[in-house]
Image (cartoon, helix red, strand yellow):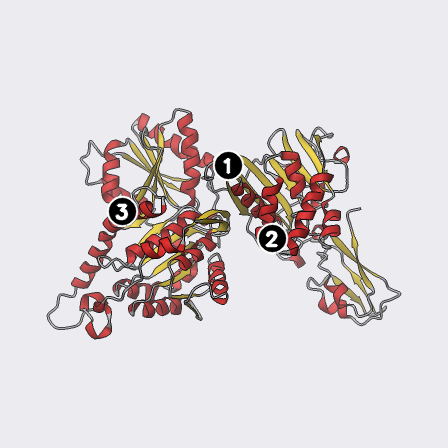
Amino acid sequence: MSYEVMVGNKAAATACKLARVQVASAFPITPQTTITEYLSEMYANGEWDFDFVNVEGELSSQVVVQGASRIGARVFTCTSGPGLLYMHHPMQTTGSGRLPVVMAVVHRGYKGMQPDHSDLMSQEWTGWGHWYVEHAQEVLDTILMAYKVAEDPRIRIPIAVGYDGYVLSYTAEPVEIPDQALVDEWLPKNKAIPEVLPDKVSPASFGRGFGGERDPQVPWKEHHDAILKIEEVHREVMDSFEKTFGRRYGNAMIEPYMMEDADVAIVAMGTIAGTCKAAVEKMQKEGKKVGLIKLRSYIPFPVKDFQEWGKKLDALAIVDRSICPGKGGPVYQRMRDTLYDLKEKDRPMTLQFHAGLGGKEVRIHDFEMIGDKTLKAVKSKKVEEPVTWV
Amino acid sequence: MIEIRLHGRGGQGAVTASRILATAAYEEGQYSQAIPMYGTERRGAPLTAFVRIDNQRVRERMLVHEPDISIVLDPLIAKQQAVVDSLKAGGIVLLNTALKPEEVKLGGDFKVATIDATTIALETLGRPITNTAILGAFVKITGALKLESIEKAIKKYFPGRLGDMNIAAVRKSYEAVKGPIQAVVKSAPKEEKMDLNVGGYGVLKDVSSWRVFTPEIDMDKCIGCKSCWIFCPETAIQWDEAKKKPSIEYRKCKGCGVCVNECPVKAIEMVRVEA
């Protein structure tokens, strides 16, 4: 094992190298650009055998990796904000085609260049797994795990790994780089599954109706069920990752932090969850029973985990770094429908917070405010302000 | 946890300095984080970067708002009171300046150390890139990191001869740093604050603070060929059609030196400003 003080984007490129990605294709867009630069540099240095396909836009980059994935190559692409929107159409086909593409989404909001989660959130209907990570080490580790999950024969679903632009993509921090031999052993080569080759195609795997008497809803159901299955495989992969490399991130779906003694939990994703860890430490020192549940997998959503936590907790403060305008915070709404299945007496209070949109900095004292507000709601048994813009 | 803020200009290597510090910390078994303040940086423009050093993985991911140490790579920026803004009480400011700590005009409850890093950089590297030259001084006055870890880190960023030159700069600054002493001026002077993280386009704003060197035209040597006027990227050079001579509008000049390179008769010279 070696280490390097590297930025988040280099951690992503390094993960590609360790995974021995065979085909990468991407169109540069800030703040993702330096991933393509690192990959181009690695290609020029001949660091491993792969093809880097230059394209004229994100739509093409997604189609290039789709084609390569269909014949069994391990593939990588990456983008940010508007670039991801431009990919929206082919992303559907990647999902429907059950192609194990792994994509880094370096968050950039739509109302300016600074990060929020509105880019990846707006792709929730594309039929991918959607994960969110906190720091550079987690970027590297999670991309490796994403290949292992996506390429699992039980899954075959593309996975997007989202991380915040600038404050993570360009921040340098020590990253432990696992030995290549260990990674090779842990992550064997991807194999094409015959069902997706055009001559043996199964209608469901192409995600299209093929006429005749076949139920046109079947491809949708198969696709949905496969994504739900990610949860089980993701947990397995996290266990084997820890066994091999000695690091883990919660149970893969969520990473509870200082929850042993907590009455209320803040739910946050990405870099701000890191800041929340520091805030939670401070609050618990002051005797406030506030913990953090870092959400790592938005799709599929850790329904069982939150139902269990929901029973134990008095309140959940859900921090959304995005909003569907006119509809609300996606994590908050998903959480509310998850908790509805609990008996009324077990159901915790829920408070909605919007923080970090448009790249607004979220500081430790912001999380203290969120914690205080949530504790106050529990004490007074009343949520006075259901939605707070931090 | 130690929190550090670096002030410099695009081209002086503040971001690299932040990464060298982060790498050196990890060499000593500590965790670290180096955050650049991302804007529309360019050569000469004031910018900031931040470093955190801790004995566990740094969790908070926000800019450093109350640094323990402020490091200033640039002698003109070092004159700005803003470099000690929100510095923790009893914190240290390390300035690149030829002044002694007693002569520094910044005011407040903090300690001041000074090092003439520009001269050291010019002597050892031949260029006014002060990022490594100031790190030796940092080690000496803070004791936060060891000199050999900084040198190890520098070798990672600058292999070969360039690394040796930078290490020489580090050692010189370790020896030559003055202070720290308690700031002589007790409270912040009232003055107009300067923006130490300038974005936006040069033509639209006063960029005179970006200069480390100022071009001066020797009108006797000038042959009126207009090369400087054509090539100035900031349209800072005006053409006087009556006299057939150029003049420099210094408000627009960021001190890039393109005019000096273009002048066929070497009529323009870059002069060091700070003295």
Alpha carbon distance from label 1 to label 2: 31 Å
Residue B54 at x, y percent in the picture: 50, 36
Q: What chain does mark 3 sit on?
A: A
Residue A104 at x, y percent in the picture: 39, 57
The residue under the point 89% across, 65% down is B220
| Count of marks overlaid on the render | 3
Quadrant of residue B110 within the rendered picture:
top right
For marks 1 and 2, give the one nearer the viewer. 1
The residue under the point 50% across, 62% down is A37
SS for tag 2?
loop
Is B205 drawn above or below residue A46 in the view shown? above
Q: Amino acid at mark 2?
A: Gly
In the picture of the structure, the residue carrying the numbered disc 1 is B54
- Judging depth in this view, the residue of B47 and A158 nearest the camera is A158
Image position of A68 (left or right of A200): right
Residue A100 at x, y percent in the picture: 30, 61
Disc 1 or 2, which lies upstream in sequence? Answer: 1
SS for tag 1?
strand
- Judging depth in this view, the residue of A15 and B222 nearest the camera is A15
Is A121 drawn above or below residue A59 in the view shown? above
Q: Which mark is residue A235?
A: 3
For marks 3 and 2, give the one nearer the viewer. 3
Q: Are marks 1 and 3 on the same chain?
A: no
Q: Are marks 1 and 2 on the same chain?
A: yes
Density class for disc 1 (Cα within 10 Å; few <14, some 14-19, many ≥20) is some
